[in-house]
Amino acid sequence: MTELGPSGRRERVRRDRRRARRRRAGLVLGGLAVAVIVFFAGLALGRALEEGPEPAAPQTLVRTLEPGTLPP
């Protein structure tokens, strides 16, 4: 294994920090994208439910049964 000098260590630390910064930025952007998608999906669902057909009024059916004759 090679021993890194002071400048090599600093370069490695800088590279690691850049990677961490990029990773953090990617996670933030990914989370933001998911939040936007969920928000618009909620809006679409709300509008679909709001614009749905109105339920029909209940219908009452009245039938009069006529008495039949009973055989003797």
Image (spheres, helix red, strand yellow):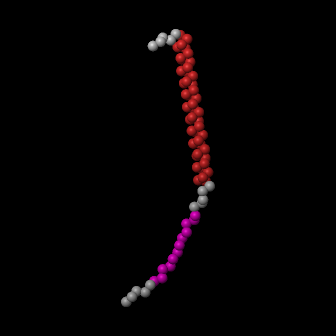
The one nearer the camera, 14 or 71, is 14
* Frontmost residue, 3 versus 33: 3
Asked whether 62 falls inside the magenta stretch, the response is yes
Give the image location of residue 36, x and y in percent: 60, 40
Q: Is residue 61 above or below residue 19?
A: below
Residue drawn at (39%, 88%) of the image: 71
User: Residue 12, how many percent across, how many down?
Assistant: 53, 17
Can you say which quadrant of the picture contains the N terminus?
A: top left
- Asked whether residue 17 is drawn in magenta, I would say no
Closer to the camera, 17 or 1? 1
| Percent of width and height locating residue 18 | 57, 22
Q: Residue furthest top?
A: 5
The image quarter in which residue 19 lies? top right
In the image as oriented, which residue stretches furthest toward the left?
72
Residue name at image x 58 percent, y 29 percent = 25
Number of marks in the rendered image: 0
Q: Quadrant of the C terminus?
A: bottom left
Q: Residue at x 56, y 18 (%)?
A: 14
Measured from the top left, where is residue 29 in percent x and y? 59, 33
Our reading of the magenta stretch's main secondary structure is loop
Give above or below for 46 relative to 33: below
Q: Decide which of 56, 27 is in the foreground and name it.
A: 27
Q: Magenta region: which residues?
A: 56-67
In this rendering, the answer to whether 22 lies above or below 55 is: above
Residue found at the far bottom of this picture: 72
